[in-house]
Amino acid sequence: MGNFLIKNCELADFETLTTKKMQILVRENRIEKIDAQIDTPAGFEVIDAKGMLAMPSFADCHSHLSQTFMKGPLDDYPITDWLVRLFRIKAVISPEENYYSCLLGALSALRCGTTVINEMADWPLLDSMLEALKDSRIRATVGISTTDIAENDATPVITIDEALKRSQAVCQKVRGIPGRRLRPSVAPAGLPACSREMMQNLKRFADERGLIFHTHLAEGRKETEDVRRKYGLDGEAEALYEFGLLDPHTLLAHSIWLSDHELDLIKETGAHPVHCPSTNLKISDGIPRIAEMLERGIDITLGCDGEASSSNRDMIREARLAAYLQKGRSLDPTVLDAGTMYRMMTAGGMQALGYEKMGEIREGNIADFILVDMDHEIGFFNPDYKLGNFLYAADGRAVDTVFLDGEILLRGGRFTFIDEEEVLSRAEKAVHSLNKKIRKVLEES
């Protein structure tokens, strides 16, 4: 962290979708002052942000970083076959391969303006993933995916006691990492791969420690039908409601196959659906009822998921796709307007994950924000419609500067703390090593 005065930036207002030329004073890790004119204090570095759009950084509320190296081998499979192959690939990935997969994923997220990731990780790969997160300097909430019911012959299953022991170990490992940028969570895979007893025990564990409870919900049509038959309920959301698992500390990735009644239950409890549009389309999950959720006042967040299914870490691309899908589905162009999308990506995501004084550029808040180069690319810049242009016509590569906790991690589109070329070189060797094993695994499946 440092002391900076950002001059001549255009400060975004998500309510009006306008900008105003302002200066931002950052002292250590806080935004100390915002004004049209600020005298430069002694010892502060001045950053001329002329032509730059200043806005809060993004929160990716559902992530699988270990899948970064799996972008490609799992293309064009439906979810059932996709899951079997995914589990088999995970079984052969080495700690070094996973380290570089997670590091590249985290750096890609930072490069596109994301400073917070809500990660659902894998127990055998936890240590290498935590090391990668630490080295990337990103903020992350980290939980372990657990299951105790085998959906197929590749599903890893454990006992409830073992799941609780692993959750305790996650808390100890994450809290033992210096810097306070990593937080533990509890993240069971979800129904139907988890029993009622596992879900309830893990939720109790999370509540006792004040942790986020992060799970998948109603992602696949077949899986949702299986839950309906098993419990005699509308679906997965009503089951979680009956189990006592839905509340404002619960994040529900995907949330696609839901009835009207289940939407009402999510609204009643304050749980947060996480929309992952690229994944939902690419592996044919379906399109969630986001427009209806918004009508009910449900707080929705956004996620890039894992690159084995989404193929990207760019929240701007995800937000644009989310908006277009719902406009087309509802035949209402006002659904998921730009202001709503920006709030979902910033303050909405931060609040759902329990981050305070983040998600807005205001005095006293933590200095997590980005500067976007509005001259980055010919074709998307109209000076009177900067916010709309960035969302609907650009992508995360237009992000020039990333502040996280008052530290500049990206400047001029380049990382300030890590040798990109060396990381890419080592990652290339690691992914070639993994690809050999992947080809063998897929041939045998």
Image: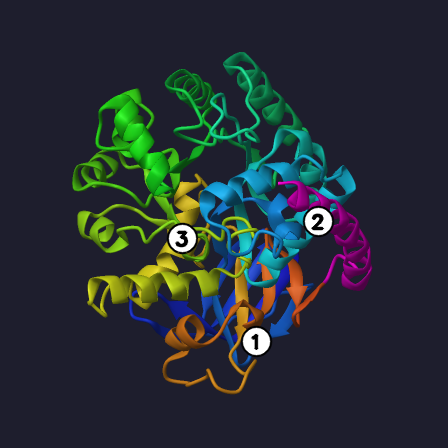
Residue 220 higher or lower than 50, as above or below: above
The three-letter amino acid code for the residue at tag 1 is Ala
Crowd rating for badge 1 (residues with CA inside 10 Å; few <14, some 14–19, many 20+)? many
Percent coordinates x, y for residue 359 in the rendering: 44, 53
Q: Which mark is residue 49?
A: 1
- In this view of the protein, can residue 39 be seen by the observer? no
Judging depth in this view, the residue of 7 and 329 nearest the camera is: 329
Does the segment drawn in magenta span residue 425? yes
Q: Name which residue lies at 60% across and 41% down.
A: 181
Q: Quadrant of residue 84?
A: top right
Q: Quadrant of residue 6?
A: bottom right
Helix or strand or loop: what does disc 2 sit on?
helix
Mark 3, residue position? 284
Judging depth in this view, the residue of 263 and 107 nearest the camera is: 263
- In this view of the protein, can residue 279 be seen by the observer? yes
Quadrant of image for the C terminus? top right
Q: Looking at the magenta stretch, what is its main secondary structure?
A: helix
Q: Is residue 438 left or right of residue 264?
A: right
Q: Is residue 21 left or right of residue 438?
A: left
State which tag comes first along the sequence, 3 or 1. 1
Mark 2, residue position? 439
Crowd rating for badge 2 (residues with CA inside 10 Å; few <14, some 14–19, many 20+)? few
Q: Name which residue lies at 56% across and 19% down.
A: 158
Judging depth in this view, the residue of 65 and 398 nearest the camera is: 65
Start-end of magenta stretch: 416-445
Mark 3 and 1 residues: CB-CB less than 8 Å, in contact? Answer: no
Q: Which mark is residue 110?
A: none
Tally of numbered discs: 3
State which tag comes first along the sequence, 3 or 2. 3
Helix or strand or loop: what does disc 3 sit on?
loop
Q: Nearer the viewer, mark 1 or mark 2?
A: 2
- The Cα atoms of the two marked residues, 1 and 2, are separated by 47 Å
